[in-house]
Image (cartoon, helix red, strand yellow):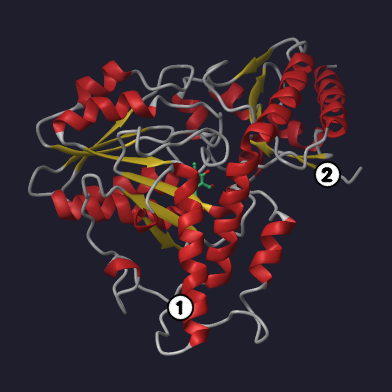
Amino acid sequence: MHFPIYLDYMATTPVDPRVKEVMDQYLTMDGIFGNPSSSSHQYGWQAKEAVEKARAQVADLINAEPAEILWTSCATEASNLAIKGACCCYQRKGKHIITLATEHKSVLNTCKAMRQHGFEVTILTPEQDGILDLKKLEDALRDDTILVSIMAVNNEIGVIQDIEAIGKLLKPKGIIFHVDAVQAAGKIDIDVRKLPVDFMSFSAHKVYGPKGVGCLFINHHPRIHCETQMHGGGHEFGLRSGTLPVHQIAAMGEAFAIAKAEMVEKNQRITKMRDYLWGELSKIPGIQLNGHPEKRVPHNLNMSFANIRSDNLVKALENLAISTSSACVSAGREPSYVLKALGLPDNLAFSSIRLSIGNYTTQEHIEYAANYIKQAIESLRD
Ligand code: PLP
C-alpha cells in the first residue's frame, strides 16, 4: 500500500489515464495543436472539432444542449461569470441576492463582492444537518430579489440540497437560480431539462479531469442573459474571451463521458466502502457524523470527535491524506466556516475530519483507514 492513503477526492481527483490519453493528443506537432479560432486551415478546424465534441460530451452528462455549455478556466470563474454577469444584466429589476452560508468561497465571496456595487446580500444559515429549509428561503425572498445561488452537493459535508424544490419556488417569481454543481457532477443524476435552474458551474478536476478547466451551463429555455466579464476577441459567444485550451477541454469532455458511462457502478462500489467505513467508525465513542445522514453523496464522511486535542489529530492521522479542520489551526486560521454554520462549537469543528472516497479507493484502503483512525483516537484519549 502506498502511504499516505489518498482519501481527499473532494479536494481534487487524479486524472483518469484514459482522459490523459485523450489530452495528450492535443498538444504536440504530431497531434491536434491548432487554435480552434483559426478558421482558414485544417489545424484550426480539427481543434474546433475537438472543442465541439467535448462540449457535446459535457452537455450529455446533464442533458443540456451543447450550445448551453460555455468553457471557463475553472468553476470559480464560471460562478463569477454567472453571478456578476446576471447581477449586471438584471439589476434594473432589483439589487437583492441570496445565498447559503455553507457555499464554496467561490460563490460566497462573489456574492459578497456584489455589495460594493450596491447589492444587498442575504446569507441564509442551513439547518444543523446542512440542509436548507425552504421556508427560510421563501421568507427571505423579496420583490427586488433577482438571483439565488445554492449548491447541489456540499464539498465539506457531502449533503445534497433539493435543487428541484428550490428552483420550483424561484421560477414563478422570475428569480434567477445559479447552482454550484461542482461536487454533484459524476456523483448524482443531473437533468437540466427537469431541474428549474438557470446557471450551473462545473469543474473538470473533481471528475477525474485536469485542473484549470471548467464550464458554465447557461439555460437557453428560456434564454438567460449574462454580461461578459472577460472581454477580448469574442470567443465563447462573446461571453468569455481567451484562446481555448483544447487539450484541457477535450480532457474534460472525456472525463464527463466516462462519468456518465460509469457513475452507477462506481457509486455502488463507493457506497459499499462508505457503509463499511462508517459501520466501523461509528463505534468510536464521542464520534458524530456531520451533515444529513441520508441526504448525502456516498463519497464523503465528515466526522467530529469529542474530547480530542485538535492539534494532535493531524499528526496522529499522518498515514491518511485527508482534510482536517485542525490543519487550519496550525496555520492560525478559523475553524471550518461550513461546520460553524451547522452550529458546531469551535472545539468540535476543530476536531473534525473529512474523508472523501473515490475511484481508486480500495476495500483494503478502507479497512486500513478504519482501524488506523480507531486506534489513533483511542491513543489520543489515553
Ligand atoms: N465549488 C465547489 C463545491 C468546490 O468543491 C470547488 C473546488 O474546490 C469549487 C467550487 C472551485 O472549483 P475550481 O477549482 O474549478 O475553481
Question: Can you tell which mark lies on residue 314?
Answer: none
Crowd around label 2: few <14 · some 14–19 · many ≥20 (10 Å): few
* Residue closest to the eye, 316 or 82: 82
Q: Which residue is mark 1?
A: 36
The residue depicted at 46 percent of the width and 16 percent of the height is 128
Query: Which amino acid type is shown beneath numbered disc 1?
Result: Pro
Query: Which amino acid type is shown beneath numbered disc 2?
Result: Pro
Task: State which quarter of the image contains the C terminus.
Answer: top right
Q: Indicate the position of residue 199 as horizontal and vertical percent values.
A: 33, 46
Q: Indicate the position of residue 348 as horizontal and vertical percent values.
A: 60, 22
Q: Is residue 35 visible?
A: no
Relative to 332, residue 32 above or below: below
For numbered disc 1, what is the local secondary structure? loop
Q: Is residue 325 left or right of residue 134?
A: right
Q: Is residue 296 visible?
A: yes
For numbered disc 2, what is the local secondary structure? loop
Task: State which quarter of the image contains the N terminus.
Answer: top right
Instruction: Measure how far apart labels 1 and 2 are at the Cα level.
Output: 41 Å
Relative to 120, residue 310 above or below: above
* Residue closest to the eye, 238 or 41: 41
* Residue closest to the eye, 6 or 239: 239
The residue depicted at 51 percent of the width and 52 percent of the height is 203
Q: Which residue is mark 2?
A: 4
Q: Indicate the position of residue 4 as horizontal and vertical percent values.
A: 83, 44
